[in-house]
Image (tube, rainbow, N blue to C red):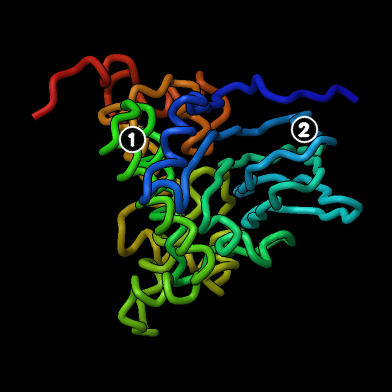
Amino acid sequence: MVKLKDGFTGERALVLPRMIVDKMEEDPLTSMLHITDIGYYPKAKYHFRERKEPINQFVFIYCIDGAGSYRIGDQEYNVSANQYFILPAGVPHSYASNPSTPWTIYWIHFKGTAAPFYAKDAGRPMDIKPERHSRISTRINLFEEIFNTLKNGYSNENLRYAFSMFHFYLGTLRYIQQYRNAGTNQVEDERIVDVAIHYMKENMEKHLSLEEISTQIGYSPSHFSMLFKKQTGHSPLTYFNLLKIQQACLLLDTTDMKINQICYKIGIEDTYYFSRLFSKIMGMSPREYRKSKKG
């Protein structure tokens, strides 16, 4: 089987210079928790990494789609969509994408005196299932803010801000129920359409069928479609595409991501289909939109 360490369409990665890492380890604030490498691999077929010689970093991997497996010492695990795990520092390990259903992952290498605390008990797959009060999209946006802050330079202010956010990012995982509860007033009679739209936003990087959405809501596809279109004026899948293009516009406006990278961020692998869909909804191509004046 082909095995690749990296080189995936739409990937993004950032490795902090050794000089910067050494500097962070001497800073009273960043020495508590800091990132050494960070990235995103979409549909990473044949992704494989084996480290027989242990490294001194913890490795966080969040699988949002597809599946894979990993080994810590002699213990093997399978991981699927909506799960994360943290590989401990100082222990041989390996991990690989499933060749049939390759994973899409966010990954971070990190160190610091607080790192073992956040990594505790996360060696096994941990669930982050989309549900009524989940805040997955908020967490993904937080990852992007960390990535973009580091990409903008290694000033003391950038580093301290990025790693302060990283404390919060890991906290949303370790204290996941508190994180979810803080984002809701606990009202249980939310409208069905609002719940469906929330579910769509939580799965922006995936392809969802009408059956998957309606099953999550607890209605038959036909009855759910009728309720949804009555309130929004659009079918559920049309509305999902509108959300995807809205997110694509945001990324075109606020980042320097390439078009094919944006495609994966909204769950569309075919760049030609994305361009056609974008043009149909926005009246111009993605490139024309990026060049157009706003405001």
Q: Is residue 258 left or right of residue 256?
A: right
> Helix or strand or loop: what does disc 2 sit on?
strand
Looking at the rendered structure, the kind of residue marked 1 is Thr
> What is the x, y in percent for residue 280?
35, 27
Viewer-closest of 139 and 167: 167
The circle drawn on residue 87 is: none
Q: Is residue 141 visible in this depiction of the protein?
A: no
> What is the x, y in percent for residue 15?
52, 27
The residue that appears at 44% across and 55% down in the rendered structure is: 169
Q: Is residue 92 above or below residue 116?
A: above
The residue that appears at 49% across and 41% down in the rendered structure is: 35
**Which residue occupies the extreme left position in the image?**
295
The circle drawn on residue 149 is: 1
The residue that appears at 18% across and 18% down in the rendered structure is: 292
In the picture of the structure, the residue carrying the numbered disc 2 is 49
Q: How many marks?
A: 2
Q: Is residue 5 left or right of residue 205?
A: right
C-alpha separation, residue under disc 1 versus residue under disc 2: 27 Å
Q: Is residue 171 above or below residue 273?
A: below
Viewer-closest of 6 and 114: 114
Viewer-closest of 114 and 264: 114
Q: Is residue 257 left or right of residue 66?
A: left
> What is the x, y in percent for residue 283?
27, 24
Looking at the rendered structure, the kind of residue marked 2 is Arg
Viewer-closest of 86 and 252: 86
Mark 2: few, some, or many residues within 10 Å (few <14, many ≥20)? some
**In which quadrant of the rendered view does residue 43 lie?**
top right
